[in-house]
Image (spheres, rainbow, N blue to C red):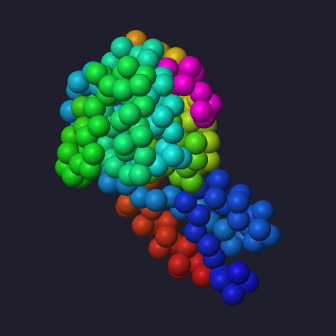
Amino acid sequence: MKDYDAFTCISGYIRDQLLSLKISSDKLHVIENGVYLPSQVSGKEDGFILFVGRLVATKGVNYLLQAMKDIDAPLKICGKGPETDRLKSLATELGVDDKVDFLGYVSDEERDRLLDRCTLYVMPSTFEAYGIAVAEAMAHRKAVVCSNVGGLPEVVRDSGVLVPPRDPKRLAEAINYLLESQEERQRLGERAAKLAEEYSWDNVGLRTLKLYQSL
């Protein structure tokens, strides 16, 4: 590691992990993954909850399905992965399959359309180094509910609701809180869009260029 002049870290969480490996703090620079900012957002809500991501155990979708027992709104799940069949079976076992729609892989255009029209975005992960899907939802001016783990608190800050991981009850409470308050969703969404500007490719690219120029 001593042969490298600098390391870029996608979050402060990852930086802290590298610090624990005795890498000098002077070499560690936090530069998040970039997101594309939409040219415009409709501001419309179609009443559904959205999750986008690979269906693996660390995404915590099983906890979201458990939370859906206490939520009276449809959930759209975009993505595929090794947990797909198990999650579909779990939805049926829990009796929530009538309000959960597994969309599988969707195109970038369809993903952006869903982000634009969802009522709120949920990321119930048990681990996230950064949480780029959350940043993308924020760029679409959406309030988010996500787990208080890894790099997610750094991304969301005060623009969403953080809940303990692996806690379907608290997850359902947070989702219902936002579903019931359009004013709060709008307030958090506006804050989210402002924060997302920090993660734009223009900003991330400029910070990366400045780091190279400093070496």
Query: In the rendered view of the protein, which quadrant contains the N terminus?
Result: bottom right
Where residue 191 sits in the image (x, y, percent)? 44, 33
At x 42%, y 31%, the residue is 90
Where residue 128 sits in the image (x, y, percent)? 55, 49
Quarter of the image for residue 190 reads top left
Left/right of residue 124 with respect to residue 142 in the rendered view = right
Numbered disc total: 0
Relative to 123, is 94 above or below? above
Left/right of residue 213 with respect to residue 108 in the rendered view = right
Q: Nearer the viewer, residue 200 or 9?
A: 9
Q: Is residue 169 magenta?
A: yes
Whether residue 128 can be seen here = yes
At x 42%, y 46%, the residue is 83
Quarter of the image for residue 91 reads top left
Q: Nearer the viewer, residue 84 or 169?
A: 84
Query: In the rendered view of the protein, which quadrant contains the C terminus?
Result: bottom right
Relative to 213, is 100 above or below? above
Quarter of the image for residue 134 reads top left
At x 26%, y 50%, the residue is 105
Q: Is residue 13 magenta?
A: no
Whether residue 136 can be seen here = no
Where residue 84 sits in the image (x, y, percent)? 37, 44
User: Which stretch appears magenta?
Assistant: 164-172
Where residue 12 sits in the image (x, y, percent)? 64, 54
